[in-house]
Image: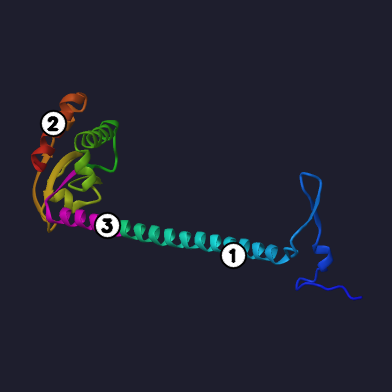
Amino acid sequence: MIDKKNQCGCKAEEQKSTNVDSCGCSTPTPSGCGCSSATTKTNNSTSKFISLILALFLTFVISYSLGKKSAKNKLAQNKANFTAIENKIKQQPQTIVYYFHATKRCMSCNLIEKTTKEVLEEKFTTQLKNGEIVFKSINFQKKPELAKQFELVSSVVVVSQYDKNGKLTKFDRLDDVWKLKSDSKKFTKYITAHVKSYCF
């Protein structure tokens, strides 16, 4: 006699396993092997896993796109700010503090240049950063046109001002830097006063 099988291929007789009640009696279990139920659970787990992967991927893509857009906007804003500052500098007079020196230099010459630069960095930090004031050290023996323009015969500090077209409008030659080089307080006051008169 051929055994009857359910759709899952299990024998019907094998499905009728018995359970034991608390009283010790045997009760037949409902027919059905549960194979279809196990397969459904596996498919559901796979679908949930795939959905989770897709959600994480979409979250990453969206976050990356937003971050990239934000960085691009910030870069554009910084560029605009830089351009605005640059245009402002071009439209306003510029003060250039020169230290003119000869080819052969002595300790006093080097000291005057060093101290002048330190005074500017301490007293005019903002103006140096935004380009309103510029410090330049130049060998006047190699720049005869500047030596003639500023009437130079020896090393000296010169405070000058140029308009927005780059034309020299005025200048002061600070010859007393040599007399004050050994007195840092008086030297600082001397340089500061002249530079201020050009900027404020």
Which numbered tag is attached to residue 77?
Answer: 3
- Which mark identifies residue 47? 1
Where residue 112 appears, as percent x and y from the top left, is 23, 33
Magenta stretch, residue numbers: 76-98
Examine the rendering and report whether any part of residue 117 can be seen: yes
Residue occupied by mark 2: 190
**Residue 50 quadrant:** bottom right
Quadrant of residue 189 in the image?
Answer: top left
For mark 3, give the secondary structure: helix
The answer to which image quadrant residue 15 occupies is bottom right
| N-terminal label among 2 and 1 | 1
The residue type indicated by label 2 comes to Tyr
At horizontal 18% and vertical 29% (from top left) the residue drawn is 188
Query: Is label 2 in contact with label 1 (beta carbons under 8 Å)?
Result: no
Of tags 3 and 1, the one toward the viewer is: 1
Q: Is residue 117 above or below residue 25?
A: above
